[in-house]
Image (cartoon, rainbow, N blue to C red):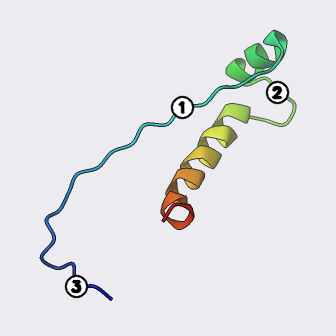
């Protein structure tokens, strides 16, 4: 392994965005939380966060 103990700390940040395509009625129900299987947007947000955490494993 390479010794990085002398390396200066760097503050890093990232911004992510997404696009959702669906029928207008479906989107409205999702925003209101009225879908048959529960909170669609909460699940999507959690999936996005978990995927972002795996980025270092996927991109060398």
Residue 25 to residue 49: above or below: above
Spot occupied by residue 59 in the image (x, y as percentages of width and height): 52, 60
Mark 2 → mark 3, Cα distance in angstroms: 52 Å
> In the drawing, does residue 57 fall left or right of residue 24?
left
Foreground of the two, 37 or 11: 11
Spot occupied by residue 34 in the image (x, y as percentages of width and height): 79, 23
Foreground of the two, 30 or 13: 13
Residue 57 to residue 40: above or below: below
Instruction: State the residue position of label 1.
Output: 17
For the residues bearing labels 2 and 3, Cβ distance under 8 angstroms:
no
Instruction: State the residue position of label 3.
Output: 3
Name of the residue lying farthest toward the bottom: 1
Spot occupied by residue 32 in the image (x, y as percentages of width and height): 70, 18
Instruction: State the residue position of label 2.
Output: 35
Q: Quadrant of the N terminus?
A: bottom left
The mark that comes first in sequence, 3 or 1, is 3
The mark that comes first in sequence, 2 or 3, is 3
- Which residue is at 80% across, 20% downward? 22
């Amino acid at each position: 392994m390479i010794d990085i103990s002398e390396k200066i700390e760097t503050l890093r940040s990232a911004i992510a965005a997404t696009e959702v395509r669906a029928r207008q009625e479906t989107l409205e129900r999702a925003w209101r939380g009225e879908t048959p299987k529960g909170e669609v947007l909460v699940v999507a947000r959690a999936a996005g966060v978990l995927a972002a955490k795996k980025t270092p494993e996927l991109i060398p």
